[in-house]
Amino acid sequence: MTDLVPVKRALISLSDKTGLDGLAAALAKRGVELVSTGGTAAKLRETGADVRDVSDLTGFPEMMDGRVKTLHPKVHGGLLGVRDNPEHAAAMDEHGIAPIDLVVVNLYPFEATLMRGASRDEIIENIDIGGPSMVRSAAKNHAFVTIVTDPADYDELLAELDRNDGATSLEFRKRMAAKAYALTAAYDSMISQWFAFGDQGKRWPESWTFSSNLKMPLRYGENPHQQAALYIPAGPHAKGIAQASQVQGKELSYNNLNDANAALELVSEFREGEPTVVIVKHANPCGVATRESLIDAWNEALACDSVSAFGGIVATNRALNAVTAEAIAQIFTEVVVAPDADEDARAIFAKKKNLRLLLTGELPDPLRGSQRMAVITGGLLVQDADTGHVTREQLKCVTKRQPTEQELKDCLFAWTVAKHVKSNAIVYARDGVTAGVGAGQMNRRDSARIAAIRAREAAEANGWPEPRTVGSAVASDAFFPFADGLLSAAEAGATAVIQPGGSIRDEEVIAAADEAGLAMLFTGMRHFRH
C-alpha cells in the first residue's frame, strides 16, 4: 500500500460551501486540476477559478434536476480504481477513466430541511445519493484517494499537502476515510429514523440505527478503573445537561454529569413555577424548596439535609444572583446548574476554582416526549421517558377526610419530587419544602423510616421544635402493598398521603388511613425509577 500519493486532480461537490474560495485557490496554486458539479462549479467560476464541469469528464450532461450527475463509471472508476493493480489500470486506460486523487464533498442538508418543517417532497429531494456514493467510493479506496467531508479539515488538508510536497500520507487518508464513513452512517441513520418515525409513524421499528458524536472523553467512569466519554446525539435532539456551557471549574466527571442531569430534570419540573432550588447527591434529591426568592429556596432546601448536601449538585430554575451564589459557596459543592448567572454571581463562584458552573439557557420541557435507553448484557432496553404528570382534577380522594388546600399543594409538590427519587421512594413535604427523602430501599416501609430519620436530624441541626414531617404530606412512587409503610408515615406526623393506588390490599391501606385520620389521594400513575 502506497504511503504518499500526489494530488493532481480534485473533485469538489458541496452543499455547504464554507471555505470553498480559500480551498480552491490553495489547490489551484498547487497545480491541482479542479472538477466540480452544478452550483459548486458556478461558485468556483465566480471566484475566477479554472474549473472543469463533471459533465465534461463523463461525457453526459447533468439530468433529472441534478439527480444524476456523478453516478457514472468515469467518476467512480476514477475513485475506485486500484492504481497498482494491472487489470484495474488497463480497464481505466481502455475506457478513458482518469484517476481522481482528492474528493471534497459534503451532503445535502437533510437535517436542516427536516428541522424547518419542509414538505415530504422537499425532504425526499434532500436525500443525497451521489454525494454519499462518492464519499464511500473514495473512502474505500483510501490507499490512493483522499476524502474530505468537513470544512473544518480544509486547513489540515492544505498543511498535509505542504508537508508532503503536494501529496497526502496514508495515515491522513485513513483518518479522513474513517470520518467519512462516520458521516455517511450518521446521515443514513437520520434518514432511516425519519422514514420510520416521522413518515410512517412506527412505534418500534424493526431496525433502529442511531448515531452520536463524541463531545469529550471524561477522566473516568463511575470509578477510576472505568473509562468514560460523553457523546451527543447526531441529528435533531433536545438540549440538556450535555449542551450546557461550562463557565468555570474542573473537568466534568461521569458522576458529575449523571448527577447534574438528575438535578436539571427535577428542577425543570418547576420551570414555570416560583423560584426553586434542588440539591442532589448520587442522583437522588436530598433537598428541594420553592419560595418567593432564590436565596430563601436555597436556605430551605439546604436545611432539609445539610449533611447529604455536602459535595452535592445544586440546580435552580432562575438565573443566579450574588446573594444566592454567596450562600451556595459557603459549602463544598461539586456542580451548580442554572439557566444563567449574573456577573456578580459568576465573580463569587470564580473564587471557588474547582466548582463547576453550568449554564443551560432555557430549561428542558419536562413534558417533551423522548426515549430512555439502558444497556443490558446482550441487548438494549428502550422506553418512553417518564413524562407522566397529574393535575389536581385527576386526583381521587379515597378516604373519609378530604385534604385541605395546603395539603393538596404539598401532595402535588411531594409527588413531583418523588418522581425523581430512586425506588422505593418516599418523600415528605410541607409548605413547598421537602421535609425528608427516603430513596432506593428494598421495601417501602424502610424508605418511609429513613425519610423520617432525615427529618428528625434536620430538626435537631436547625433547632426546630419538631420535625417538618409533622403536618406534612407524604408521597410514595408506587402503591403501599401493606399498611405498614403508611403507618410509618403517620407515626412521623404526616397528615396527607399521595400514592398511585392499585394494590390488592388497597382497602386495607385505606382503612388504616381512615383510622389514622389521614387524607389520601390516588393518582392512578406509578413513578418507579431505577
Image (spheres, rainbow, N blue to C red):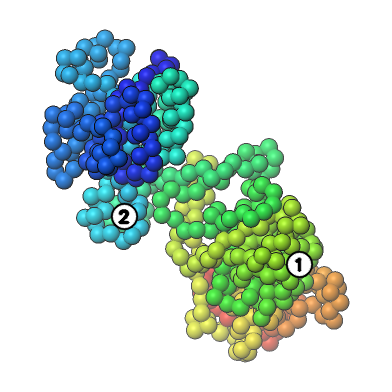
User: Which of the 4 image quarters holds residue 342?
Assistant: bottom right
Q: Nearer the viewer, residue 481 or 408?
A: 408
Q: Residue at x 56, y 84 (%)?
A: 398
Q: Residue at x 72, y 57 (%)?
A: 350
Q: Nearer the viewer, residue 507 or 280?
A: 280
Q: Is residue 375 above or below residue 482?
A: above
Q: Position of residue 465 (x, y in %)?
A: 85, 81
Please name the amino acid that badge 1 sits on: Glu
Q: Position of residue 426 (x, y in %)?
A: 66, 69
Q: Look at mark 1 in the image and give the residue it sits on.
A: 326
Q: Image check: 384 left or right of 20? A: right
Q: Look at mark 2 in the image and give the residue it sits on.
A: 113
Disc 1 is placed on an element classified as helix
Q: Nearer the viewer, residue 432 or 77?
A: 77
Please name the amino acid that badge 2 sits on: Thr
Q: Residues under labels 1 and 2: Cα distance? A: 46 Å
Q: Is residue 92 above or below residue 103?
A: above
Q: Position of residue 107 (x, y in %)?
A: 32, 42
Q: Position of residue 268 (x, y in %)?
A: 56, 68
Residue situated furthest front in the rendering? 48
Q: Work out whether mark 1 precedes mark 2 in sequence or the reverse, and give the earlier one.
A: 2
Disc 2 is placed on an element classified as helix
Q: Nearer the viewer, residue 260 or 482?
A: 260
Residue density around tag 1, few if under 14, some if 14–19, many if 20 or more, within 10 Å: some
User: Which of the 4 image quarters holds residue 424?
Assistant: bottom right
Is residue 489 visible in the rendered structure shown here?
Answer: no
Q: Is residue 402 above or below residue 497?
A: below
Residue situated furthest top in the rendering? 86
Q: Which quadrant is the C terminus positioned in? A: bottom right
Q: Which quadrant is the N terminus positioned in? A: top left
Q: Image check: 270 left or right of 484? A: left
